[in-house]
Every structure is written in structure tokens, then in C-alpha cells.
Image: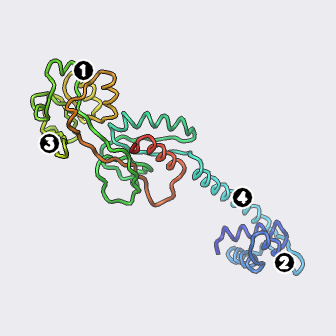
């Protein structure tokens, strides 16, 4: 028999004074109550209750054991209550992994608003473009850009991650405005790359459903797009970057979109979480808020 259940039945019997009263309170037969108490006594090798046809009373060992049972059962109830509370109310530490550029420019402002809304949640945010194993590294939520591989994770789609091509007004005034993707070969392009600097950088454009890949080059390349954005606003070249970030730069007049008739790359983006357990309130609330913010409009 389950020992915790037997301890609970024994404690109830001790409090109510009889197996019959405990049986009625617990919704089981008096015979089952007797079996639970007998199971405890057999496992301990002691007598907990002295019983006659009319009454029962705790032995000295039984009274001491009852006192400890109450403490154990209270701790179990507390643990159960805490688990249920965490399922119903967002709280605790939430570990999230996201790509660097999206995390720095788009996700971080969202995270601060989320934390303001849920003051009982603490969030550990890891920004990296490498592959992350959520089980080995302890992440509860992942945000990924690109095609998904088969996995045991549950994936929820977000709006596609779209890229635009921009340059500063000063750069375009000095070097001219590219009218076709091929014209980029005559310009300094700011290449985002987290691989070998010897590999060529290729930008993909699409017009009327036809894809076109262009090899671009320039004097500056980096594995941090924030550095490239700064260089672009300083007039040092043409950058390709996330549409939601560049929209603010365009509106402020620091950058100008070029090749507007050609669509830049658009990559699928998802939020993922493990499927092997029931999501807690902190996970559910974060994902719901993330989809409301970054889901397809």
C-alpha cells in the first residue's frame, strides 16, 4: 500500500477515535481503514493502536508516530499547494533562450513589460545563435528562427522574421541608390556573419515569386548585427536586417529603405517548450503574451 495514504488514514483514525468514523470521513470502508493501519504496523514492526470492540487508543509509540505523521502530511499538503499555485499563478524563475539580434532589439523590451505585469516571476534570458538543447541546459522556453527540425518540443508559430535592406541618407547621397540587386556589387555592404570571414556573404531577394541570390561584399563584417546597424546609421554601408527594427530607424530618418520592390528573406519563427510535462502558469503566461506581441497579425 502507498505509505503516505496509510499515514493519512492512520492519522484520521487517531483523530476520530474509530475505524468507522475514519472510513466515513475518508469515503472508504472500515475494512480498508484497518488494512492501511495494519500495513503501517507491519512495516514498522510495532503496534500503533490498541483496539477493542468498543474503543481504541494510541500506544506510546503510536502517539509519537502520529505527531510525526502530522508534520509529514502537512509538508506534503504544502508541497501540493505550492505546485497547484505555480500551475495557476505565474511565479518562480523562467529560463528563456533566444537568438541574439531578435533578443536584443525586440524581445528585451517585451520581457521588461512582461516582468512588470507578473512581479512574482524572475527571468533568465540567454541570447545565442547556437543550437540550444533545452533538456541538457535547463531552458523552459526557446525562440528559434528558421526551419524546425523534428523534436519532442511543442512549437507555436510566430510572425515570420522578415529582413529589409537599408542605408543612411548620407551614404546614398554620396554613393547613389541601388536600383536592382545586382547594383549592390558596386556598394559597401555590411555583412552579418557568425562563420568564417573567408566565406562569401549572399543576400537573397524575391520579386514576383522568383528568388535571386546576390553575393555582396564590403569592408566591415561582424557576428553582431547591432554593430552593423551602428555602422549603417553612420553612413558606412548598406545593411540587411530585421524589418521591425529597421522600421523605427526609417521612421526616424536615420535610414532609408532601398530596393522596396524586392522582398528580402523571410524566415519562419517559433516559440518552443518541452512536451513532457504540464506547462506551469509562468510558461503559459509568457507564451500567450509572446504570441499576442509577435504572432501573425
Mark 3 secondary-structure assignment: strand
Q: Is there CB contact under 8 Å for labels 4 and 2?
A: no
Q: Quadrant of the C terminus?
A: top left
Location of residue 196 by image quarter = top left
Q: Position of residue 295 (x, y in %)?
A: 41, 44
Left or right? Give the position of 262 relative to 98: left
Dot 3 corresponds to which residue? 213
Q: Residues within 10 Å of mark 1 (few under 14, many from 20)?
A: some
Mark 4 secondary-structure assignment: helix
> Which residue occupies the foreground of this view, 86 or 272?
272
> Which residue occupies the foreground of this view, 63 or 251?
251
Disc on the earlier residue, 1 or 3: 3
Question: What whole-number distance in Å separates the C-alpha atoms at marks 2 and 1?
Answer: 90 Å
Q: Position of residue 187 (x, y in %)?
A: 13, 28
Which is closer to the viewer, label 2 or label 1? 1
Which is closer to the viewer, label 3 or label 4? 3
- Number of labels in the image equals 4
Q: Position of residue 258 (x, y in %)?
A: 21, 29
Label number found at residue 51: 2
At x 30%, y 36%, the residue is 242
Disc on the earlier residue, 3 or 4: 4
Dot 4 corresponds to which residue? 71
Label number found at residue 234: 1
Question: What whole-number distance in Å separates the C-alpha atoms at marks 4 and 2?
Answer: 24 Å
Question: What whole-number distance in Å separates the C-alpha atoms at marks 1 and 3?
Answer: 27 Å
Which is closer to the viewer, label 4 or label 1? 1
Which is closer to the viewer, label 3 or label 2? 3
Mark 2 secondary-structure assignment: strand
Amino acid at each position: 500500500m502507498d505509505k503516505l495514504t496509510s499515514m493519512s488514514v492512520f492519522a484520521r483514525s487517531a483523530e476520530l477515535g474509530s475505524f468507522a468514523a475514519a472510513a466515513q470521513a475518508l469515503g472508504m470502508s472500515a475494512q480498508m481503514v484497518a488494512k492501511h493501519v495494519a500495513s503501517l504496523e507491519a512495516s514498522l514492526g510495532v503496534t500503533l493502536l490498541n483496539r477493542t470492540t468498543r474503543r481504541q487508543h494510541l500506544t506510546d509509540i503510536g502517539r509519537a508516530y502520529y505527531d510525526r505523521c502530522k508534520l509529514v502530511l502537512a509538508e506534503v499538503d504544502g508541497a501540493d499547494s505550492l505546485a497547484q499555485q505555480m500551475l495557476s499563478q505565474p511565479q518562480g524563475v523562467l529560463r528563456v533562450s533566444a537568438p541574439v539580434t531578435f533578443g536584443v532589439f525586440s524581445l528585451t523590451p517585451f520581457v521588461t513589460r512582461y516582468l512588470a505585469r507578473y512581479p512574482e516571476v524572475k527571468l533568465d534570458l540567454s541570447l545565442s545563435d547556437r543550437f540550444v538543447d533545452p533538456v541538457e541546459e535547463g531552458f523552459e522556453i526557446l525562440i528559434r528562427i528558421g526551419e524546425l527540425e523534428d523534436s519532442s518540443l511543442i512549437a507555436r508559430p510566430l510572425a515570420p522574421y522578415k529582413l529589409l535592406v537599408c542605408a543612411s541618407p548620407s551614404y546614398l547621397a554620396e554613393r547613389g541608390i541601388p536600383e536592382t540587386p545586382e547594383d549592390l556589387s558596386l556598394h559597401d555592404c555590411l555583412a552579418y556573419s557568425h562563420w568564417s570571414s573567408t566565406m562569401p556573404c549572399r543576400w537573397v531577394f524575391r520579386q514576383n515569386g522568383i528568388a535571386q541570390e546576390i553575393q555582396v561584399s564590403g569592408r566591415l563584417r561582424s557576428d553582431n548585427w547591432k554593430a552593423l546597424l551602428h555602422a549603417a546609421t553612420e553612413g558606412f554601408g548598406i545593411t540587411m536586417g530585421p524589418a521591425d527594427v529597421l522600421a523605427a530607424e526609417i521612421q526616424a530618418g536615420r535610414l532609408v529603405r532601398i530596393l522596396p520592390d524586392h522582398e528580402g528573406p523571410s524566415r519562419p519563427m517559433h516559440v518552443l517548450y518541452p512536451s513532457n510535462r504540464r506547462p506551469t502558469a509562468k510558461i503559459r503566461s509568457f507564451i500567450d503574451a509572446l504570441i499576442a506581441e509577435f504572432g501573425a497579425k
